Image: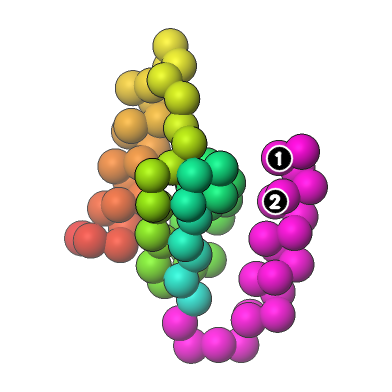
């Protein structure tokens, strides 16, 4: 299901390739998708907004927090 959601977001994003600013907003499960997509292509979006993302705690949470820190650092240097 996540792969289908990513394909859908990629399709929608392709419609805005020539736009000067791209903002990815994700709420709940969409927040989890936005998070994964941002990790996959951090420079593709100008801004990313997570609204109560459905991120579950996993044993590797420090790994994800480091990745999230890098993503946030890219947008807020």
How crowded pointer 2 is (Cα within 10 Å; few <14, some 14-19, many 20+) is rated as: some
Principal SS element in the magenta part? helix
Instruction: State the separation of the CA atoms marked 1 and 2.
Output: 6 Å
3 relative position to 54: left or right: right
Circles 1 and 2 in contact, beta carbons < 8 Å: yes
Q: Is residue 36 above or below residue 42?
A: above
**Residue drawn at 38 percent across, 59 percent down:** 49
Please tell me the numbered disc located at residue 6.
Answer: 2
Whole-percent x and y of residue 77? Answer: 20, 60
77 relative position to 26: left or right: left
Q: Residue furthest top?
A: 59
Whole-percent x and y of residue 65? Answer: 33, 32
How crowded pointer 1 is (Cα within 10 Å; few <14, some 14-19, many 20+) is rated as: few
Q: Is residue 52 above or below residue 74?
A: above
Q: Is residue 15 magenta?
A: yes
Q: Is residue 44 magenta?
A: no
Q: Is residue 37 above or below residue 75?
A: above
Q: Identify the element where label 2 is drawn.
A: helix
**Residue drawn at 48 percent across, 88 percent down:** 20
Which residues are the magenta region?
Answer: 1-21
50 relative position to 14: left or right: left
- Name the residue nearer the viewer: 57 or 40: 57
Q: Quadrant of residue 21?
A: bottom left
Q: Quadrant of the N terminus?
A: top right
Q: Which residue is mark 1?
A: 2
Q: Is residue 42 visible?
A: yes
């Amino acid at each position: 299901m996540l792969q289908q959601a990513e394909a859908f977001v990629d399709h929608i994003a392709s419609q805005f390739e020539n736009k000067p600013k791209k903002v990815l907003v994700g709420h709940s499960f969409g927040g989890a998708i936005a998070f994964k997509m941002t990790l996959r292509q951090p420079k593709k979006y100008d801004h990313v907004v997570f609204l109560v993302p459905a991120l579950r705690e996993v044993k590797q949470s420090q790994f994800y927090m480091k990745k999230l820190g890098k993503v946030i650092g890219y947008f807020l240097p």
